[in-house]
Amino acid sequence: MVRELKITPIKNGTVIDHIGNGLALEVLRIIGVRELDRDSTVSVALHVRSQKIGWKDIVKVENMELSPRKVNAIALIAPTATIAIIRDFKVQEKRAVDLPDRIGGVLRCPNSSCITNQHEPVESEFEVARRRPVVLRCAYCERLVDEFLPNLA
Amino acid sequence: MGLKGRDLISIRDLSREEIEEILKASRRMIPYAEGQKAGHQLDDRLLVMAFFEPSTRTRLSFETAAQRLGARCVTIADPTASSMRKGESLHDTVRMLSSYGDAIILRHPNEGSGRLAAMASDKPVINAGDGAGQHPSQTLLDLATMQEAFGTLSGLRVVLLGDLKYGRTVHSLAHALAVFGAELVLSSPPTLGLPEEVREHLDQMGAKVTEVDQLHRAVRDADVLYVTRIQKERFGDEAEYSKVAGSYRIDNAVLAGGKPRMIVMHPLPRTGEIAPEVDGTTHAAYFRQAFLGVPVRMALLSLILTGKAV
C-alpha cells in the first residue's frame, strides 16, 4: 500500500493513515510540526482515494512516535485514523486510534464559566459520554461536548 | 459503598439506593430539625461554610442543620472579604480550609468548582451550588418533599414548569426523578425548553417524558407541579417577558383544574410565579419544601461525617 503513494516511504517514524478527508492539517497541528527535529521530513497527502473511507488524508512524520495524549487528540478529530509505527522501512505496529474512557489535557472545556477555564492549577478532563458519534462530558462542569476542533487545547 | 467520607458534588454521584438511604435518614431527622429532640451526632465537629457567592436559604439551612446536630461552623459569607480577591486560586483556598474543618460546604459561581474542590480537599466536600451547574442537596430536598406527600416517587406524574433551560435545579431533578421511575411532563416557553442533551440523557435512561405547551393541560393530571422562576434577563424586552411570565402564573383558578392532592413546589425565591392566594391551600408545598432542606442536610452531614444518621 505504501508503494502506491506519490510520497516517499520513511525509514523510521509514524504514518497516520485513513485521516478523514481535509483533516490532515489539524492532525499536523496536534503533532506540533514546529517542535519536530529539523532533520525530520513531514509528508502530507491530501484527498487520496481510499477503499475504506472514500477519500482520505495521510500524514507521515520521520523520526517521531506519538505520545498517548496526541493519539487521543487525533482519535477525537479523526476517529477513522490508523497509526503505523515504521522502523527500518517496515511496519512494526499498526492500530486504529482508540479513545480511552477518560481524556485529560487534550481539549479546553467550551463552557467559559467552567472552573477549568479560570486560571486554576488543573488540567481539563473529559469522560466519554457516548462513543458513536463521540460525545464527551467535562469531568468538572458536566458540559457535553461534541465539537472538538475549535476546542483543542 | 457507604456515604461516610464521601464528597457530594452532583446528584449523579449517588446511586438510587444511596438516595433512598438519605431520604430515609431525612425523615428520622425531622424531630431534630423541629427542635423537639436535641441532636448530638456532630458534637465537636467543625464545618467550613465556604460561600463565594451570595446565598441566604442554602447557607442558613446548612448552618441550621449543622448546629441542630451539635456541630460548629466557620463561615465565609462575603466573597469580597476573601483571599480570592487577592488572586488566590480556589484550589489553594480549599486546600487550606480542608486543614481547618471536618468538611467543606461550598457555593461558588463557576461550574465544576465543586469537583475541583473535592480534588483539592482531603475532607469531604458538599457542593451547595456551582454556578449554573449542580446543587445536589436541592434535588434531595425536592425528592424528600414529593416522597413525604405521596409516600413514593415511582409513578408520580411531575410537571416541570417554566424555565427548563437555565433553571439549575431542573436538570438534576429530572435526572433523579428518572432514576426513580417518575413520569416527567415538560411545560415551558419555546425559548426556554429543556436543553437537547438533557432530554437525550433522559431518553437514554428510559424515562417517560412528554411535552405539554398549555398550562391547564399540564395541570390536569399532575401529581406535582414544580414551578421555576422565569428570569427577566433571559428576554430581550420587558413586554415579551411579561407576556411569557404571565402565561405561566399559578393561581387558584389554574389549580382548580388539577387533582385535589396535587402539590405545588418551587425552589424559592418566587417572584410572582405563584400567587400568594395559593399559600393557604393544601396544594402549597413550597414552604414545607424549604423546611425539609434542613432535615435533608442534617441527614447528609451526619451520613457523610459519621456514617450514620440517628
Image: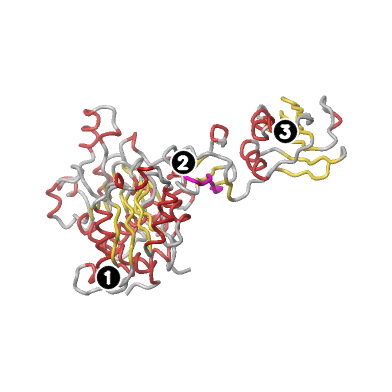
Q: Which residue bears the numbered disc 2?
A: A119
Determine the CA span between mark 3 and mark 1.
62 Å
Badge 3 and badge 1 both on one subunit: no
Chain identifier of the residue bearing label 3 in the image: A
Mark 2–mark 1 Cα distance, whole angstroms, equals: 38 Å
Magenta region includes residue B13:
no
Discs 3, 1 touching: Cβ within 8 Å: no
- The kind of residue tagged 1 is Gly
Looking at the image, is A15 positioned above or below residue B177? above
Mark 2 vs mark 3, CA separation in Å:
29 Å
Residue depicted at 26% across the width and 51% down the height: B267
Which image quarter: residue B306? bottom left
Locate the C terminus of chain A and report the quarter of the image it occupies. Answer: top right
Mark 3 residue element: loop
Residue picked out by circle 1: B70
Q: Picture coordinates of residue B294 (x, y %)?
A: 26, 62
Q: Amino acid at mark 3?
A: Leu
Please tell me whether mark 2 or mark 1 is closer to you in this view: 2
How many numbered discs?
A: 3
Where in the figure is residue B275, as x and y percent of width and height? Answer: 15, 45
Task: Determine whether label 2 and label 1 are within 8 Å by CB.
Answer: no
Residue range in magenta is A118-129
